[in-house]
Image (cartoon, coloured by chain):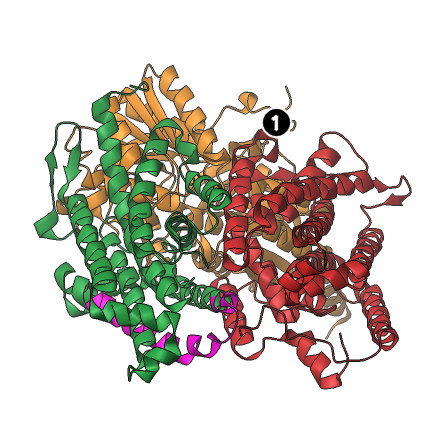
Chain colours: A red, B orange, C green
Amino acid sequence: MMAAVGEYVEAPAVPAAVTQRHQAVGFAVMVAFFSVMPFFVYPIFLMKALCFALFACAFNLLIGYVGLLSFGHAVFLGSAGYVSAHTAKVWGWPPELAILGGAVVAGALGVAIGFLSIRSKGIYFANITLALAQMVYFFCVQAKFTGGEDGIQAVPRGMMFGLFDLRNSLTLYFVVLAIFAGGFLLTYRAIHSPFGQVLKAIRENEPRAVSLGYRPEHYKLIAFVLSATLSGLAGGTKAIVFQLASLADVHWTMSGEVVLMTLLGGLGTVFGPVVGALTLVMLEHYLVQLGAWVTIIQGAIFVVCVLTFRRGIVGELARALKKPL
Amino acid sequence: MGKTSFVALLALCLMTGTAQAQISDGVIKIGVLNDQSGPYADITGPGSVVAARMAVEDFGATAKGMKVEIVFADHQNKPDVGSQIARQWYDAEKVDLIIDVPTSSIALAINQIAREKNKAFIVSGAATSDLTGKACSPNTIHWTYDTWALANGTGTAVVRTGGDTWFFLTADYAFGHALERDVEAVVQKSGGRVVGKVRHPFPTSDFSSFLLQAQASKAKIIGLANAGADTINAIKQGAEFGIAKGGQQFAGLLVFISDVHALGLEKAQGLVLTESFYWDQNDRTRAWSKRFAERHRGAMPTMVQAGVYSAVTHYLKAIDSLKGDDGPKVITRMKELPTDDPVFGKGTVRVDGRKVHPMYLFEVKKPAESKGPWDYYKLRATIPADQAFRPLDQGDCSLVKK
Amino acid sequence: MFGIPPQALFGQLLIGLINGSFYALLSLGLAVIFGLLNIINFAHGAQYMMGAFAAYFLLQYAGLGYGWALLIAPVIIGLLGMALERVTLKRLYHLDHLYGLLLTFGVALIIQGVFRYEFGSSGLPYPIPRALEGGKNLGFMFLPNYRAWVIVLSLVVCFGTWLVIERTRLGAYLRAATENPTLVRAFGINVPRMITLTYGFGVGLAALAGVLAAPIYQVNPLMGGDLIIVVFAVVVIGGMGSILGSIITGFTLGLVEGLTKVFYPEASNTVIFVIMAIVLLVRPTGLFGRAS
């Protein structure tokens, strides 16, 4: 019997209240860590890590808890980026509305793509998401408003809620941290709710879930749209932070990167995607002089993770501590 | 020692001390940002870093008491990677000058960032003429070439030598469109005609279908409004499909000597292109290029790499004269001083940030005409510096007083 | 017709057929590997690239020309593929297919990174073999001899492979081994070895396509990159288990792409994905695919 992707990152059997306490501690540690870091490390770098962490959390929702590998998830990140950039720069929207607009559009795209792909499973699902993503990529290359290869540049940071001047790196940082924390809590809530339980049931034994009266396609679609919307939230935020929206964010190699982050961190763990994203962003940063070596090392991480490290960093940590993380 | 000498010595120390204090943190930090491992690595890449180092050494920076540090990074042709590195360099790592930056979209992004952070930016690798046009900035100089110069050089000169009907093979992205548009305008102004065009996806590896359309058009000249691997593939497959035998000629609108090297003379012969530098032009360029090649795996410098050498030399000259490295002030000084180096010879930097020097129309030699590796070009025409670049008043640059 | 003369149309269709040959050959390798082994070989594009480089090295350092390269390169790269299978893929058979995909994706990144680091990205020249130079003027277009050779060789190899797998005993063993390895092993057939050899064969096919491509596309480390997802689309449309499906789809898609290049050239990279999306919606396991 083949193990499904992410399946054996199963939490050991502890009462729900205990689980929640461990994870609440984990959450507090994470927030504390990120609150302190900008005073030691360049904030823009940390914000990049946070945006990708949110993206990876959204992606993890789909692969870790629903068991679906989407190979085109970059389109949600990138299209939201374009929408946020355009609304902020050309229509003059304030940043909170620009980012929300991006997330909403990504969600709508998620409905369309999800509806078309949900009926497939496994490798077919991966392929159809890839195909649809390529079409979106083509649209982004051709459409006038995206600026093609140049992308949308000089996106204004603006004033959040009319109060916070986002041109100040530190203010922007804490806003981004708040957005990340919000998105993270939302995925957490989704997983640890009755909705999440049904998803788990569907992943483990779909026919039985059907026999109990659940409609798997509905649940999968909802999870897909949620994942897409949160990816959009990450994309919109990223566009405001870097003041740029470009084709790189909708390209299929970006979809590959988020898979890597989640795999490295730990599929189906709560904190895995955050750790994976942070690790990968750090790696790319420190190897920036080495060009091709970044690809080689990413490939090596994939290989090592798949062969011997399938639980990922957080998964292994969880097993060692015997606590669900 | 006597009191006078002591005072003199003290004064000397204080003066040099003060001079150093005006250079931020006592170090002139130059960041070479380009594509180190992707499609443009041979055009810019590690070679530009070599060129920058040579410039610092040849200038005698250490002897003059200037501490110069060179860092480099790979922007992988991605605007987000490039702008992030630029921000980090300017903000957190005290880089004073960013130089090179191929890929126009990244250059435009950094142009903006340099302005915000009040630092210096010199572009050698990117082509967009907007850098000295509507995007011009008091913090930026565009050094080696631009789309206008290429369009003007290749377009006008080719039409003048009889290539008056054109078919465009254009890469379907912003840069390709811009190049096509600029050359089309020049061709029509010189009395030529554009009989057809086709846009191919970027990037493409198989051009057979597009070449067939070019052949059917019977245009004398097939203009390649693309770059890098696309250009190389188009030319290579053109040879296969007998383009030259059919009496048509390729005009490479953005071709570098490294591309010709990758193609080989067998395939590239007869190709017409415009560059601002060729290693075998005169004794000074030959001597410099040989020294470069020794440090760069035997490969001769491209115009972009030569441009980095020339720009860094002039930058250091300006700092030496100014005794400070404040971004816009150095750039202004660079516009005031005339340039002179073994690579481009004498030249100037205009008020809109455009470095001017002559451009050259080259034709690729036939294999029989070449005496050895890298002996690839014969000179077809020289466009003098005052005609090679877009006239000051046509650029829509806010720095130019009307 | 349609605003372009019929002669020009034939020329474009012929070009489409030539490109289709590459798609067919590459997707054949992928289909063999997936159809028989249930492995999704994302490293196929990188192995194609290695085939082209092998041809270049054989010429440069051993003075062995194109003809030798056609025979030797697939064998060398095939052997490397077998080593990869033995060392890594073997350990993943009890898991979800997707891990195989992720592993080969990682391997592809490594291979491409290493080659890019060593050889840069401008590419290396490889000459068209003298015997195949020149071309014939067919009236509606000038057809280079080499391109005609590409079609011929692809058809021969594709048909030959299909024949072996569907019509010979060896092929029967292979197909049986995928469906019920324990039973086949009980007959005394070394199933793991067959699997390794089959993977090697599929990889060899990719390398053969690489040698075929070397004289007309630049030999460069990025050549497999974007090609792999197109070939994936071909295999998926044809039906992931079906050898015949991928061959037919490969040639057909080449034709479709060729037509797109005439009427809407900017979309020629994307039309295959549009078709894939449509096919998957209508027939989720592909045109000739077996229901899984």
Name the residue: 40% across, 56% down.
C290
Main SS class of the magenta portion in the image: helix
Q: Residue furthest front?
A: A211
A219 up-or-down from C47: above or below: above
Location of residue A109 (image quadrant): top right
Label 1: chain letter: B
Name the residue: 71% across, 30% down.
A90
Kind of residue indicated by mark 1: Cys
Query: In the picture provided, is C142 more to the left or to the right than A147?
Result: left
State the quadrant of the C terminus of chain A: bottom right
Magenta extent: C72-100
Name the residue: 19% across, 44% down.
C147
Query: In the picture provided, is C53 more to the left or to the right than B21?
Result: left
Mark 1 crowdedness (10 Å alpha carbons): few <14, some 14-19, many ≥20: many
> Where residue B391 sits in the image (x, y, percent)?
50, 23
- Badge 1 is on which residue? B397
Q: Residue furthest right?
A: A163
- Given residues B300 and C267, the one toward you in this image is C267
> Where residue C122 sits in the image (x, y, percent)?
35, 53
> Where residue B362 sits in the image (x, y, percent)?
28, 36
Name the residue: 36% across, 28% down.
B198
> Where residue B363 sits in the image (x, y, percent)?
25, 37
Query: In the picture provided, is A146 more to the left or to the right than B193?
Result: right
Query: In the picture provided, is C240 more to the left or to the right than A20?
Result: left
Residue B118 in magenta stretch: no
Residue B118 in view (yes/no):
no
